[in-house]
Image: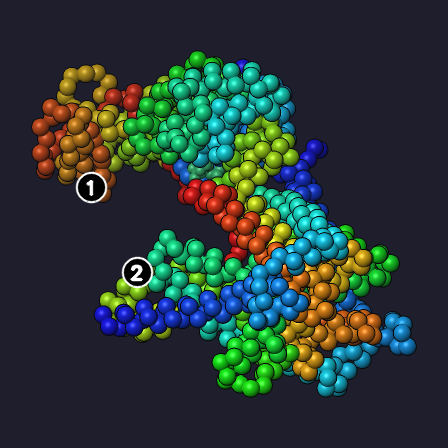
Amino acid sequence: MSMTLEQSEQRKAWGFVAPALAWTLAFFVVPFLFMVAMSLWSRQSGAIVRAWNLDNYLAFFEKAALFKGLVNSLEITLIVTVLSVVLAYPLAWIIAERVPKRFQRMALIMAVLPFWTSYVVRSYSWLLVLSKNGVVNQTLMTVGLVGEPLELASNRTATVIGFTHFFVMLLTLTIYANLIQLSPNYRRAAADLGANAFETFWHVIVPLTLPGIMTGAFLTFVLCIGDYVTPQILGGNNELVLPQIIMLQLGRRADFPMAAALSIILMLAVTLAYVLCARWLKIERA
Amino acid sequence: MLRNVLISTASWVYATLIFGFIFLPVAVLVLFSFQDGRLPVPPFNGFSTQWYTAVFADRKLMAALLNSFVVALFSSLIACLLGFLAAYALARHKLPGSALQRGLLIAPMTVSYLIIALGLLTVLNAFGIPLSLSTVGIGHVVINLPLCFAIIYSSMGDHHVNIERAARDLGASDIKVMVLVTAPMLMPSILAAFFLSVTFSWDEFIIAFLLSRFDVTLPVEIWSLLRSGLNPKTNAIGSLVFQVSVAVLMLLEFTLFRKTGKS
Amino acid sequence: MTAAVSVQNATKTFGMFTALNDVSLDIEAGEFIVLLGPSGCGKTTLLSILGGFLSPTNGRISIGGREMTHVQPANRPTTTMFQDYALFPHMKLRDNVGFGLRMRGMAKAARDEKALGFLDLVGLRAAAEKKPHELSGGQRQRVALARALAVDPDVLLLDEPLGALDLKLRRQMQDELKAIQKRVGTTFVHVTHDQEEAMAIADRIVVMNQGRIEDIGAPADIYMRPRSLFSAGFMGEVNFIPGRVADVDPVSAQIETALGTMTLARSAFTAGAPFAGQAVTLCIRPEHFRRAGNGTAELVTLGSAQMTGQAFFGTHYRCHLRPQGAPDLSIIAHMPQSAHVSEGEAVTLAVHAGDVVVLPSATKDA
Ligand SMILES: Nc1ncnc2c1ncn2[C@@H]1O[C@H](COP(=O)(O)OP(=O)(O)OP(=O)(O)O)[C@@H](O)[C@H]1O
Ligand SMILES: [Mg+2]
């Protein structure tokens, strides 16, 4: 019997989805599984030994230098996430509520304009601002507030500033998108029921924008904890974060198994964060 | 009344401060790209375009610029094409395990670029495949495919189904339906997916860094410039990229998206 | 140009759900057929099977004598006109109408010419350069018709093409559709759930319910001589009066009801020969009631009834009556404008024997 119309349609549909699936399988799933396998091998005297063991993971918990990397990563990421939300929310609110409607789009574009510098250059430009002979130090010295230049770059603060700069822009965008979707009727209803401006904001606006905030915060967390560029340029050599340590394994020692194990740990941290805030995350099903 | 004035003032002060914070590094970057001297930090010695001249004279930078452009263009085209086909198949047909397939296609979005790069690197090494611009492109398709798929898939509304059926009914083959009917109808979101991909690929560092060898992209070339410390030439190439991006953005804003924004 | 359509024992199931249940239907070339039925009864499913968007789970389709069960829509001599018009939003009307010709490889000049001709047919030649979003609902509907006709289909399938239009425009488009169908001679299969629309345009109506065909026939036939209770009720207001066949002879049957015993010709039994003891339902349309004693022959009297309510409808009075023989039955009857009836008044009901249809009562388990 010949194929039914539905069957031949379905067969064609498989043909259309196949290339994308194949690409994802070949260049994402297979490499990932390969990396998982790799993390269970080890590197001895320059060669990779394909003997299954948990040595890399055990080493992570035993060697303080490695474990400290995760702690640094988590601390920096949490500080950056909270700081970015706290700084971005008022800006998004001002653009959504205080700026006249027809200028809002322009104000938003301005607020995220530095996105369009290259990512590497953005961190570099903070060096210009923060380094020993940078803009801030020279200004302070000219004014006479300090005699000696301050050590502003090459430390955790510089990393946090660099990250925050990037994520304030990102979060302003996501929170703004959330705020303008709120019907003005919520505010009117709240005022009608006797709430003052602050109560309205705290009890009505904030809870309603919470999903948007959480989505933005999660995005910040994921991008921040996996980033190598910003800490490498701004963070100095004292408090390495996990991605830097991973890159060290690759570079100096070519220890792929260890790098793979650390990557898996990094991924688990992200997964954990996802599980923790999953109930606020509204990943839209289209 | 008074409270309103207070909020207004506070808003203005806050907005000014934050905008200052956002623009400070970029302003410094651009200003000192015109520095007449060897250090891109105060004092500003005078206006000079010598560093831009130096950028254009730098064969490696120019090659990297071209490489970045090629990689961004091709990886975005592939990502859009594959994403479009997959979205068409999954939005228009009932395939077994379609939720799983969607999940799989979106999955790379939730994984750090570093991990994607590392995974690809280990596999490429294992199979002895040499690193090149193509391997960078492969990596960039991996990160952009989920994006293109998600954007295009979410714009394929059910109200388009009968329009495509009508086209098939009138004799169009599947390819013709897609080219003549589906793609034109979804053009705004396809373009959005494409330009977003180009931006991401253009600016991507870690995958390009780990998966390339001799031919490198612009972010990787700038990375190696950074070894020379603070250098007005880095300012110049950074400002250049910024200015061109903003110009393109404005162009798109006032032509393409102005039009589609209305309809 | 035109072709006959034959559906043989088509069944369509979606998982556990049977959307079409053993449907057989023969349509003559050039006929205007209307599929009529309530929402969800399987009209669209049947149309999709004819158009090539679905294959039947069982059964066969042939069009113009050729086997079509699993043939792609593009390769069928059918075109479909969709309820939401499904015009290509990014194309001018001329290109919309010319699309099918373009797919058939016709050169631009020739197909533009032909497209303009079809736009002319639906009165939209002047708007050829416009895009669909610049048109009103009725105009879009015409473009969809022109586009479907432009490829000279043998069979045109129309899925509730008038559903989105307001009542006035709808009546106007019905007439136009009918006129255009006469002109082009194509077989039309038209879906609707509006029985007035069906009667206005159909050569034959196919009444469907729960995936089955209940009745097939010319509009007057379906209305006056329905072959199922569902069909009788769906085509318009009707009184159902339960009864029992007391006796059968070669030309007539005697029926006992709460309103009295009556003798009806066997032609009143549209759904099959009666047998003694059969539980039946009498179907009487409200406009078929006559006042007894008008002197005309062959009147069957139904006893006296009391007027319990009435409303003036312009062309007639619509009255609620409570029969003396069966106080729990409520009868609806239309009275002429001249009938000065008042509430509480007693009237004697009567009908022409030829207007009564008798159908087997629905058995409990069916
Ligand atoms: N693809 C499908 N999957 C599952 N059930 C379906 C599918 N298509 C139709 N059905 C079911 O089959 C039944 C008949 O559907 P159909 O669309 O033919 O009804 P219809 O008579 O056209 O109704 P309407 O007047 O509302 O358009 C409905 O109950 C519907 O829910
Ligand atoms: Mg329908």
In the image, residue A211 lies at what x, y percent? 47, 66
| Residue B22 seen from this side | yes
Q: Name the residue rendered at 11%, 26% in the picture.
A: C339
User: On the picture, is C254 further left or further right than A280?
Assistant: left
The residue that label 2 is drawn on is: A185
**Counting other residues with Cα less than 10 Å from the Cα at mark 1, is it few (<14), some (14-19), or many (20 or more)?**
few
Q: Quadrant of residue C70?
A: top right
In the image, residue C226 lies at what x, y percent? 37, 27
- Depth check: give the residue in front, C309 or A157: A157
**Residues at discs 1 and 2 both on one chain:** no
Q: Amino acid at mark 2?
A: Asn
- Do tag 1 and tag 2 residues touch (Cβ < 8 Å)? no
**Counting other residues with Cα less than 10 Å from the Cα at mark 2, is it few (<14), some (14-19), or many (20 or more)?**
few
User: On the picture, is C135 further left or further right than A144?
Assistant: left
- Depth check: give the residue in front, C304 or B119: B119
Q: Is residue B72 above or below residue A71?
A: above
Secondary structure state at the residue bearing disc 2: helix
Q: Residue lying farthest front?
A: B46
| Residue A129 seen from this side | no
Q: Amino acid at mark 1?
A: Pro
In the image, residue A175 lies at what x, y percent? 45, 64
Q: Is residue C145 above or below residue B34?
A: above
Label 2 marks a residue whose chain is A
Q: Name the residue rendered at 76%, 68% in the picture.
A: A36
Q: How is the image coloured?
A: rainbow
Q: Quadrant of residue A220?
A: bottom right
User: On the picture, is B88 further left or further right than C143?
Assistant: right
The residue that label 1 is drawn on is: C327
Q: CA distance from mark 1 to mark 2?
A: 56 Å
